Image: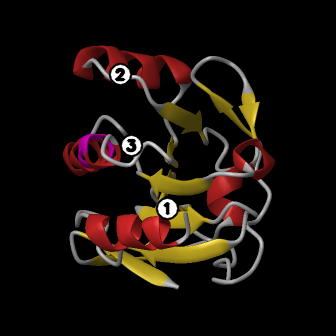
Amino acid sequence: MFITRHNNPYELKGELPIVGEKAPHFSLECIHGEVKTPESFAGSVTLISVVPDINTRVCDIQTKAFHKKMKEHPSIQLVTISKNNKDEFKNWCSANDVAMEMLCDVDFTFGEAYGIYVPELSVDQRSIFVLDQNGTIVYQEIVQEMTDEPNYDEAIQVALNHL
């Protein structure tokens, strides 16, 4: 699959997961040092927001938007994943006065497992995945143009429909 960044094409590495199948395994460290896997969120509907780099404009907008919107839906687990390390995530959370689940994909194992790694740019493509309580993917959006925002409302509505 190809995506664009400023209208320049880039190929994604890996196989995209299939809606209706179990989420591919991942093992990522959160900002508090704990390792999280899909099983860590079992029993909860989980919205995974993937951003290329938390310290860029659109990623900042996306993360703030989901954080704000999800305050109205505390029964949905929000997780943000990016290439950023723990310190970068902690600094972003501190600067924005938020506490949220953020997972570090510094070696791009999540990106490759979910088919969204962009090797030429060393980032994961902007995307959204919604997992039901059993860890099945019920929604995915791979944003075609990296600098565009995802469809927040559609992803949240799908998550709400699976509560």
Check residue 65 for magenta coloring: yes
Answer left or right for 155 relative to 129: left
Q: Which mark is residue 120?
A: 1
Helix, strand or loop: magenta stretch: helix
Q: Report the side of 30 relative to 26 (left or right).
A: left
Amino acid type indicated by mark 2: Cys
The 10 Å Cα crowd at callout 1, few under 14, some 14 to 19, many 20 or more, is: few
Q: Is residue 62 left or right of residue 88?
A: left
**Pointer 3 with pointer 2, Cβ within 8 A:** no
Q: Is residue 132 left or right of residue 75?
A: right
Assign a secondary structure to mark 1.
loop
Q: Position of residue 76 (x, y in %)?
A: 50, 50
Start-end of magenta stretch = 64-68
Residue located at (67% from left, 43% from top): 107
Residue 137, how many percent across, how many down? Answer: 64, 72
Q: Is residue 11 visible?
A: no
Q: Percent from the top left, x then y, of residue 106?
A: 61, 38
Mark seen at residue 53: 3
Q: Mark 3 vs mark 2: which is more N-terminal?
A: 3
Which residue occupies the foreground of this view, 119 or 17? 17
Q: CA distance from mark 1 to mark 3?
A: 15 Å
- Residue designated by label 2: 93
